[in-house]
Image: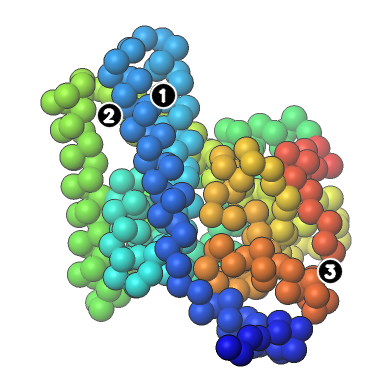
Amino acid sequence: MACYDPGQMSFQEQMARLHSDRRNVAILDMSITWAITAAAVYLLVRHPGPWSYAAVFVTIGLMQYRMVIACHEAVHKRLLFPLWLNETVGSIHCALIGINLMWYRRQHLGHHAAQDIGHDTDAYIYEPVLRTRPGIRRLAVWIFGTAREVIEKVQQKGFTVAATVEARGKARLLSLAIVAAQAVLLAASAIWLSWWYYFAFWFLPLGTIAIFMNRTRVLIEHGYPHVPGRRDVELREADVVTIDLSAGFLERFFIAPYMFNYHFTHHVAPSLPYYKNPELARLLEQHGKVRSTARPSYGQALRHVLWE
């Protein structure tokens, strides 16, 4: 049987080999997310009380954030294979957390296409933080800017983005799916638990913890290369850049599921299945296509962004 030698393959050939992988690795990640969510609901039902309320609120918010990242992979049509499975599962995940997959896809691909921060559709997340003086002021904008971000997300990924004639039917269907998913969750809470559980343990964690986690990740990955900023360069004219980060088990699980810490690598090849990003990162290093292989952790990078 003939075997290939990666050392004898061109960069393009190795890239093609990485893209050809079509395994449904994401099933395990999604199963873990839903298992933990189910365990949180079980705790809520069997042991209601202040401590369980707090634990469930935080846990569900963190799992909702993992669902957001799963939706990101669906946007790039690399969550599951074949495509119909990606679109079906991706749409369901998005509907449960209030995102229209079509609007998210259009908005996010605009982020990848942007050459400068002024045209980056994700700049509303990190640009205001970077414009603020490092220290307490920047810390405050990072934390309390979450409220403003919720409004932006609804406008970009919810119901208010204008549709093309061709996309209008599918977009409306996905918007109706959001309404239906939230109605089912509310009805289930009202029937088996209490109606206010939906707002306290689904709606509020989504609008606080899940969005704040995603906000922090975007700030780190796209803000880090701009700190400290040059005073002679207008921030909105600066290039859209990002970095790969190192991440231990906890950071990978809670901040960077689906190998999101390979964010520079992801921007090099957005259509690559996420589980091949480590291989692509090594390939880029071997071919001298990265400036530096130094990778701070998320914690180190966040300190750098907020205080330097």
| Secondary structure state at the residue bearing disc 3 | loop
Residue 298 image offset from top left, x and y in percent = 71, 44
| Pair 1/2: label in front | 1
Quadrant where the C terminus is found in the figure: top right
Residue 198 badge? 2
Which residue in the structure is indicated by mark 1? 56
Question: Based on the displayed image, in which of its 4 quarters is residue 232 positioned?
Answer: bottom right
Question: Nearest the camera: 206 or 288?
Answer: 288
| Secondary structure state at the residue bearing disc 1 | helix
Q: Residue at x 84, y 69 (%)?
A: 291
Q: Amino acid at mark 1?
A: Val
Please identify the residue farthest to the front as the structure is shown. Answer: 1
- Whether residue 298 is situated above or below residue 140 in the rendered picture: below
Q: Residue at x 62, y 38 (%)?
A: 250
Q: CA distance from mark 2 to mark 3?
A: 47 Å
Residue 268 image offset from top left, x and y in percent = 65, 73
Mark nearer the N terminus (1 vs 2): 1
Q: Residue at x 49, y 64 (%)?
A: 108
Q: Residue at x 75, y 45 (%)?
A: 297
Mark nearer the N terminus (2 vs 3): 2
Residue 291 badge? 3
Question: Based on the displayed image, in which of its 4 quarters is residue 134 positioned?
Answer: top right
Apparent side of residue 305 relative to residue 222 in the rendered image (left or right): right
| Secondary structure state at the residue bearing disc 2 | helix
Q: CA distance from mark 1 to mark 2?
A: 12 Å
Residue 81 image offset from top left, x and y in percent = 38, 69
Apparent side of residue 51 relative to residue 132 in the rendered image (left or right): left
Mark nearer the N terminus (3 vs 1): 1
Q: Amino acid at mark 3?
A: Arg
Q: Amino acid at mark 2?
A: Tyr
Q: Residues within 10 Å of mark 1 (few under 14, many from 20)?
A: many
